[in-house]
Amino acid sequence: MRAKLTLLSALAFGTITGALATACQTYDFEPVEPLAIAQTTVEETIQARSRKPNIMMLVDISGSMTDPVNKADPDCQVTVGDQLETCGDSVPCNTAICPTRWTELQAAVPQFLANSGKFVRFGLTTYPETNGSTSSAVACNPSTVKSVLKDLPAAEDDASLLTHANDINSLIQGIPNAGAGRPFGGTPTSRSLRFVGGLEGMQTKDRTNFVILLTDGLPNCNPENVNEGSNPTACKCTQTGATACSGSFARLGCLDMDASVTAVRELSDKDITTIVIGFGAETAEGNGPAVLDAMARAGGFARTCEAGQTSCGPNDPCDPVTRLCQRSFYQAGNQAELAQALEAISKKVVNPEPCLIPMDPSQLPSDPKLIVVYIDGERSLTGDNTWSLDTRGVLFNGAACERIKASSPDSPINIEIRAIRQR
């Protein structure tokens, strides 16, 4: 194979050959301050980029999902006997004036599924699996085959996938906030993650596989938890009330952080990426951020700040070296924030343009001439049948794009982009 030049030498080569043609001329040089430059190399091996990813949505339907989004809202206070209490799991909320986490989730999901449905093979699994019961005996049951409300689709065409995604939305809308079939129980996250990680459709190696974990509570319900309520410091009880983390819930009520992080790592070992979304107050305070952050980092889908130093949000600094946000998981407190998180995930996962190699603004060259592209080790010049540079990155055209679409695990394409940016 022909040896590749560095970007500077590749760009200089054309200048040198031009200079040789006019070697009889003389020049006076004036010293100038050296420019500060940065070189970016983006290398990507493209394997079957046209194949749409699998995304299994693992949705928490524990009892706390019926809690108000804003517990301080006066409309969420109900009279029970002669006492004023906050509505929720015990006393249903009037969702017309007091939206709950569940109704806010139901309002945020349709747009996400509609926008992404053509480009993704969605599935839906819920947890815990109570089979409609509100008995404490089933409150900690993890996901089972009954929990797979919609498996990954068999079809691949856009129309069929969109119909499949809309069916998932209908299933989510069909789960009531109160009454029979409402969200109920604990949060057996670790065991439910292991269940979806074992689903047959998630074992494929010819496309990328994701689990979107959407939860409003801290993981618990692990009967093998090494901690128990008799040791409050180690237990970190996730329940409230006089009988919390005692009796049959002595272990089940304790925080299940270690096993949940391990379960995410096990999915990663199977090439399944876990995307973590926390929804509600419990995931934003106390032990919540540390637990979900550890899971997100293990899952391989940490939030990035490629859009700029302030793109992580308030009180969430961006690491200028790694371009990662300090908080790795997505956190939402209401419908608008959840919709925003889902949109951000969609932009990273959905690939409506398989022939685009995205580059964030910090990677783009300061001049269109300061970029070199290699396809399978051979330098490729810009053109109608090769590639062009725009504000999003490098867009491959014509024959080069067709090569990318036809790539497969057995016949991958290696794309290397080298760019210089003047600081």
Image (cartoon, helix red, strand yellow):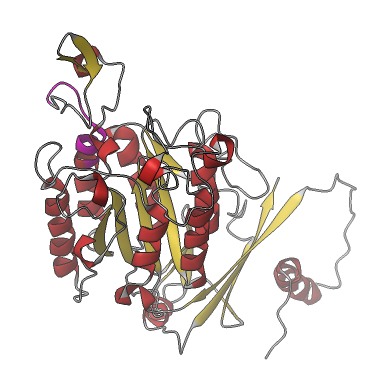
The front one of 291 and 348 is 291
Residue 251's place in the image compared with 77, above or below, is below
Give left or right: position of 323 versus 113.
right
Magenta region? 96-105
What x and y, as percent, mark residue 355? 40, 69
Residue 422's place in the image compared with 406, above or below, is above
Residue occupying image coordinates x 38% and y 77%: 203
Residue 151's place in the image compared with 299, above or below, is below
Give left or right: position of 184 versus 259.
left
Would residue 397 be visible to someone looking at this image?
yes
Tell me if residue 98 is in the magenta stretch: yes
Would residue 148 be visible to someone looking at this image?
no
Residue at the front extreme of this rendering: 247
Q: Name the image quarter holding the C terminus.
A: top right
Q: How many marks?
A: 0
Residue at the top extreme of this rendering: 82
Give left or right: position of 90 versus 391.
left
Q: Name the image quarter holding the N terminus.
A: bottom right
Give left or right: position of 373 versus 218.
right
Residue 310's place in the image compared with 218, above or below, is above
**Residue 384 figure quarter:** bottom left
What x and y, as percent, mark residue 79? 16, 13
What x and y, as percent, mark residue 88? 22, 28
The front one of 356 and 280 is 280
Residue occupying image coordinates x 21% and y 43%: 183
Tell me if residue 302 is in the magenta stretch: no
What x and y, as percent, mark residue 25? 85, 67
Residue occupying image coordinates x 22% and y 38%: 102
